[in-house]
Amino acid sequence: MKNDETTCIDTEFSKQNAKEVFGTLEWASKNANFISGCEHDCKYCYSKEMAIRFKRKTAENWKNEEVRGESFKKKFKKIDGKYMFPSSHDIHPMHLNESLFFLEKILEAGNDVLIVTKPHFECIEAICREFAAFKDNIMFRFTIGSVNSDTLKFWEAGAPCYEERLSCLKFAFALGFETSLSCEPMLDNNVENLINETLPYITDSIWIGKANFLIKRLKTNKCNSKEEIRKAEELIEWQKDENIKLLYKRFKANPKIKWKESIKKVVDIRISTTIGSDR
Ligand code: SF4
């Protein structure tokens, strides 16, 4: 698949075996993006790492969002499978109008869209209001790696707190939209609380995944102070195989809990070979 854009979700594993699908391809057939940079400025961001590596952005200016004219003007056709929007930036109030315009083009072409975001209430309210008629074509996937807002603030400085993200989930659920969660990366060792608090508002699934290549990524993203490396090492320790196996054992019977490739390979689940199967 042509992949001319970096992705918020890790795709590096996909190089290992062409038959197995990873990263965003586990969830959707194609990605749609129109912004370079992201106000949320997550320390572990894969898109930021790629942008720095290919000299499109620096660690310092990654958080300055710039609309990419050509991408913004793109015309969409109906595709097999669904689009993931966005995958290399997020939906921030600063570019909400542009995001609504862009999303409308994807939907008007007859596509299903997986909206993946660390949600701002203002944005989710607007999307639900503007696209009520497309309810059957939209699934929300809200990214929440912890129930602790201090933890979220540490790793995702510009993104909303836990309470705001939970409000978005409840709001979309109450309006009858399809809802799901991405807990990738898990940001602490308290995933059980997150699952218990959010599950009543989930119509589809909660995806669990580890933080991949964390130390390498933090170094490229210039988030490698002593404190940041210490926190990263703590996270890596929490996500060691024996803890992942315990987590899997605890939730494997729940059909709404799904496991990203970083966990599948630890607990020996077959990795999907179907692009966009969302399984
Ligand atoms: S939300 Fe975070 S991980 Fe996603 S693109 Fe923005 S900075 Fe990167």
Image (tube, rainbow, N blue to C red):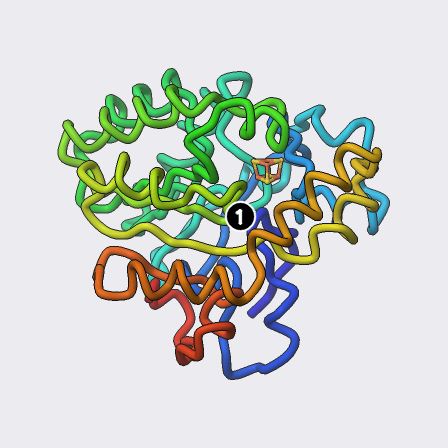
Question: Mark 1 sits on what residue?
Answer: 185
Quadrant where the N terminus lies? bottom right
Residue 70: x percent and y percent?
A: 63, 40
Amino acid type for the residue under numbered disc 1: Pro
State ligand 1's quadrant: top right
Q: Is mark 1 within 8 Å of ligand 1?
A: no
Q: How many marks?
A: 1
Quarter of the view holding residue 167 = top left
Q: Quadrant of residue 120?
A: top left
Secondary structure under tag 1 reads: loop
Q: Is residue 72 above or below residue 253?
A: above
In the shown orientation, is residue 140 left or right of residue 190?
A: left
Q: Residue at x 71, y 42 (%)?
A: 48
Q: Nearer the viewer, residue 126 or 9?
A: 9
Q: Please state if 200 lies on the left or on the right of 32 as rendered.
A: left
Residue shown at 42% from the left, 54% from the top: 208
In this rendering, the answer to whether 128 lies above or below 243 is above
Of residue 138 and residue 256, the one placed in the foreground of this image is 256
Q: Out of 198 and 88, give the one closest to the viewer.
A: 198
Quarter assignment of residue 100: top left
Residue 206 percent across, percent down from the top left: 32, 50
Q: Residue at x 63, y 57 (%)?
A: 212
Q: Let me know if residue 134 appears in the view.
A: no
Q: Is residue 113 at least partly visible in the picture?
A: yes
As drawn, 38 above or below 196: above
